[in-house]
Image (cartoon, grey):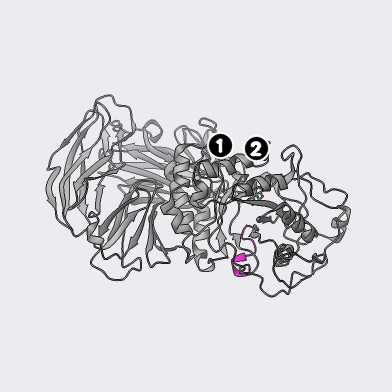
Amino acid sequence: MRVHFRTIPRRGHSRIVGALSTALLCTAGLTALPAAAATPTAPTPPGPAHTAHTTGTTDAPRLPDGLATTPPMGFNNWNSTQCRAEFNEDMVKGIADLFIDKGLKDAGYEYVNLDDCWALPERDANGKLVPDPQRFPHGIKAVGDYVHSKGLKLGIYTSAGTKTCSDVGFPGALGHEASDARQFADWGVDYLKYDNCNNQGVDAKQRYRTMRDALKATGRPIVYSICEWGENEPWEWASDVGHLWRTTGDISDSWSSMLGILKQNLPLAPHAGPGHWNDPDMLEVGNGGMTDTEYRSHFSLWSMMSAPLLIGSDLRKATPQTFEILDNKDVIALDQDAAGKQATVLESASGRWTVVKELANGDRAVALFNESDQPQRIATTAAAAGLPQADGYRLRDLWQHRDSHTTGTIAATVPAHGTTVYRVSTDRRWATYPPAVEAGTDGPPLVEAGTPAGLRTTVGNLGATPAKDVTVALQAPRGWRIQATSPSKARALPGGRQLGTTWQITAPAGTAAGSYPLPLTAGYRPPAGARVVTTLPGTAHVVVPPPAGTPYASAMSWMTSSNGWGPVEKDTSVGEREAGDGRPLTVGGTVFAKGLGVHAPSEVTLYTGGRCRVFDARVGIDDESGGKGSAAFEVWANGKRVAGSGTLTGTDAARPVTADISGARTVRLVVTDGGDGVDHDHADWSDAKFTC
Ligand code: GLA
């Protein structure tokens, strides 16, 4: 079984942090760097007055220098192409063209940055870097000229080591700082990303200061992006070294990667400011591994965190939705706000995050982010967000691009993995905006095909002026029957009041189990202006009732399942890859014919419809983990934990777990990692069955 080094960099980068011997450096044909790296004396630059520095260790602060007063915006090819051949001159020029044609330049995107693999593996006879003639047949300067002719700027990449991070190992700048910086400046480079691979154990502060000084010595204003993945806590020392510093390992195009990085970068808020930014890595928006809802969260939260906005998808193939996200000027304005204050977490519980950013004009941006897999209501107030006391506030929804007013409550039902972002202002004219109307449900409804299921919806007026001619409607899939069993209309809903409506929802007999869209639409007329219609995306789950008797969990249909590695398996252990690749469930030498094979962290939700009394199983770590691994098993009924195994290790025998689940409509089988990470956690719910 695999050991999962999830934080190990891709492509076998050698991230050497311990010092390597001089002998090794010499065999590699390199000049060994003494403890205080000898940086060749910089040539006299043509640019602004400066003091020449020849070492990187004792310099007076060189930053701030007026660059990157707001987080850099632009493009970098890495997340979409890595080193593939499509990373070439045509791509770079194509992106520059699209910046103009699609209005992205107008939205603030400026830098067109080349990542690793632009060079040949060897320097020339004079020690100069050589652009790869296949990718850049006209050289880098020509690309720079093209980019500059469009009013844009050019960025380049190298490593503060002997080679870059790619497996091929292109030349790094360690020991060549002055020469490489000079070459970049001569090509018209405006931005340098300086990576950390093959660093030979030389002190990070020294390596990054040496390049800072080399860049400065060229006299060309060059934004300096430190990319040492947060290993040396650059937020503590780099504010006078670079304009931005990576705070984490590499992002990848997945929800879990984006989320993990978010959580590492949020607490670093105090360290960010104009000219010195935390960099949670480049955007994945549009690369296909997340939903548009997730990409909107990614973009919103990166903007809230004053992160650099470097587009990481190949815009030549981007969808209209991708452009719409990247071009959201209301959200970009948060990122580019002149105060440069990174957002802080006001509250975080049960996957509901309230994140607040103070803006230069006194406004607050409030992001309501739902990390969970279910829609959730997230709420706060203008006062909690730091706004002064007032009778009303202007509330701008930055994804809907709509203004309303509230007397203080800021709330929304946010879809799973979604983010609602408001800009909240004190505004003397607040009452001229429509009252904010919040729609919500007690759903999602669980519907047995052919049998009516209930749902309650609410439409609440968060403002001070009345909402008139209020109508509420549910849009069900074709063939479904939707019936309001209480009023779904109101002539007027005064400020602070709610219209609650109960519904009966019937899916036709034979409807297959699964999730179906069930959006809720609320319409109203504000005191002045056009009718407002808001839609809350929603779902209904068609569920299959449990059979009478003692059905096995593996024979029932699950509402949802999630697993650390590979899919949850029926009647076998987890194989970590495709469905059906497991082996017989075996715990402590005993083989079980029935059960669920999962991998921590895991959750399986089953529908019991109030018809079952008991759940029981014999749980443990599968023997195929070779005695390693640990996990804890929990049974949840109707949202409450009703049984748990405690932590079991790979050497424990199967432990019986019995839970009273009388009356529960749903049962959730949860496996956590036992507190030591998920490696080897092949967890078996052996013999798992219900008494119904
Ligand atoms: C490192 C960096 C990435 C990218 C690659 C290129 O992993 O962190 O952002 O630049 O190297 O090889």
Residue 658 as seen in the image, left or right of residue 162: left
Q: Which residue sits at x=28%, y=32%?
A: 545
Q: Residue furthest front?
A: 149
- Relative height, residue 270 to residue 481 (above, below): below
Magenta residues (range): 228-238
Q: Quadrant of residue 234?
A: bottom right
Residue 397's label in the rendered image is none
Give the residue at mark 1: 316
Numbered disc 1: secondary structure = helix
Three-letter amino acid code at the position of disc 2:
Asp
Three-letter amino acid code at the position of disc 1:
Arg
Residue 536 as seen in the image, left or right of residue 604: left
Q: Nearer the viewer, residue 644 or 268?
A: 268
- Relative height, residue 623 to residue 493 (above, below): above
**Disc 1 or 2, which lies upstream in sequence?**
2
Give the residue at mark 2: 90
Relative image position of residue 93 (x, y in whole percent): 63, 41
Residue 600 seen in the figure: no
Relative image position of residue 631 (x, y in whole percent): 50, 50
Q: Nearer the viewer, residue 556 or 358?
A: 358
Position of the C terminus, as image quadrant, is top left
Residue 409 seen in the figure: yes
Cβ of mark 2 under 8 Å from ligand 1: the answer is no
* Real-space CA distance between mark 1 and mark 2, rounded to the nearest whole angstrom: 11 Å
